[in-house]
Image: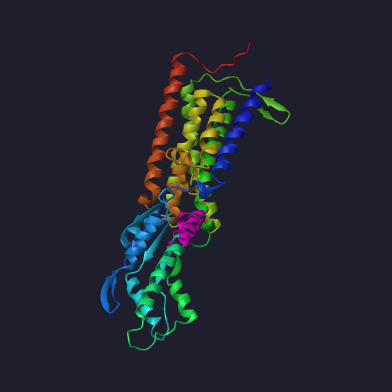
Amino acid sequence: MLLFPIAVLTLLTALLGIMYLDYVVDPEKNLHDFPIALVNQDVGDVIATGGQQRQVNFGNQITEALEKGVPADKVDLRVISISEAERQLQSGAVYGAIVIPSDFSKRLGILGVGSVIPGEMERPIITLQTNPRTGAFGTQIVLRVGDQALTEVNKQVGKQLTDQVAEQLKPQPGGPPAPELSGATRVTLADPVNVVVQQYHPLPDGTGQGLSAFFYALLLLLAGVVGAMVIHTMIDAQLGFVPTEYGPWYVHYPPTPISRFSTLLIKWGVMVVTANIVSAVYLSVATLLDMPIDHPLALFLYSALAIIAVGITCLSTLAAIGSAGLLVNLILFIVLGLPSSGGTVPIEATPKYFGWLASFEPMHQVFLGIRAILYFDASFEAGLARGVWMAVVGVAIGLVVGAVVSRFYDYKGLHRTNRVAA
């Protein structure tokens, strides 16, 4: 009697330890398929070298260097157009973008000429755009990857530019001696590219640096799981299937002659009504706290749908396997759901099995839907479509499983009556 709860608790805590520590202890090591866009708009330029004119495109050289230098097993570097990059940034499909401007080669050539001819020199720019709406942790990864990759590229471009200038300064036979480069000029040539970090579509105040969507999704999940547990227990108590204790008082009503399926229908109905009320409460609280909400109706409707999906599934699990369903619901929706949600650490920075869990775990689907509504203008492409249809699938699975199992129990005459254990 005593060993069983100890064993169950030990296994549960071990699972908690693995899931909650494995996904956060070393994101750099776990990094895989992390999507970053690379946009090369450089049109090239004609430069004079050794008395001859030649066409160059430093943007192409940098693109090739980045493709070779960025580890393909860790970063999914997508070489795309500026319009496609903006579309993917707007939908949260990429965590950031490296943008090489159209006049990059021209400005780099001017820098080389300016190092020989006295005057002010302006370094060409490469823009590293972050996507703060995908989360603060994803932004930090973009900055780290971009800094490492562009620093190495800067060294290569600097060496090439220095060699080019040295070629230009070679004295002609019988001509005047070559001018000496100043120390400042040499430093500029060695580090010719100015990397500018920009936020693409910055988040407004009141979003917790991109964490408000995660915690809002967590509230919805808890409302479904805890709500199902409360509804299941309280309705069973009122129908006389379980006792109710109020401090030292103990009440156990006579069992109501009602089928399992009818009982489940009552619980489902209460869950649907409660979900809409809770959704309205959350929306009101968020509004009072000045949380930016551009699409309140969409947030209310999707929140209610998500709570209903989770609650109906939890109630069906409890109807199917009884009290053990509490543990199953805890593991399915909380233990496995939170670390695989992608709400704090990107899925691409966690062990690969978290990506498998995220393909079906309810928490990830709810997070995508809420994030799309709060941060991406309720765009279906940004995850709202997936969040909606996965919630609908969850409702359907819960209804089918609950109806089939409870009707089967009723058909077999397995009625809910008080039985005394032998």
Residue at the extreme right: 248
Q: Residue 407 is drawn in which quadrant? A: top left
Which one is nearer the viewer's eye here, 221 or 261? 221
Locate the C terminus by quadrant: top right
Is residue 201 among the parts visible in the rendering?
A: no
**Residue stretch in magenta:** 129-148
Task: Kindly identify the residue that appears in the image at 55 percent across and 20 percent down.
Answer: 256
Establish if 329 lies above or below 388: above
Residue 331's spot in the image, x, y percent?
A: 54, 34
Establish if 243 lies above or below 89: above
Task: Kindly identify the residue that appears in the image at 45 percent across and 13 percent down.
Answer: 412
Residue 142 shown in magenta:
yes
Residue 301's spot in the image, x, y percent?
A: 43, 46
- Quick check: 55 left or right of 297? left
Task: Kindly identify the residue that appears in the image at 60 percent across and 19 percent down.
Answer: 254
| Predominant secondary structure, magenta span | helix
Locate the N terminus by quadrant: top right
Establish if 179 lies above or below 419: below
Q: Residue 188 is drawn in which quadrant? A: bottom left
Residue 317's spot in the image, x, y percent?
A: 49, 28
Residue 202's spot in the image, x, y percent?
A: 46, 63
Residue 359 shown in magenta:
no
Which one is nearer the viewer's eye here, 171 or 110? 171
Is residue 353 among the parts visible in the rendering?
A: yes
Which one is nearer the viewer's eye here, 70 or 20? 70
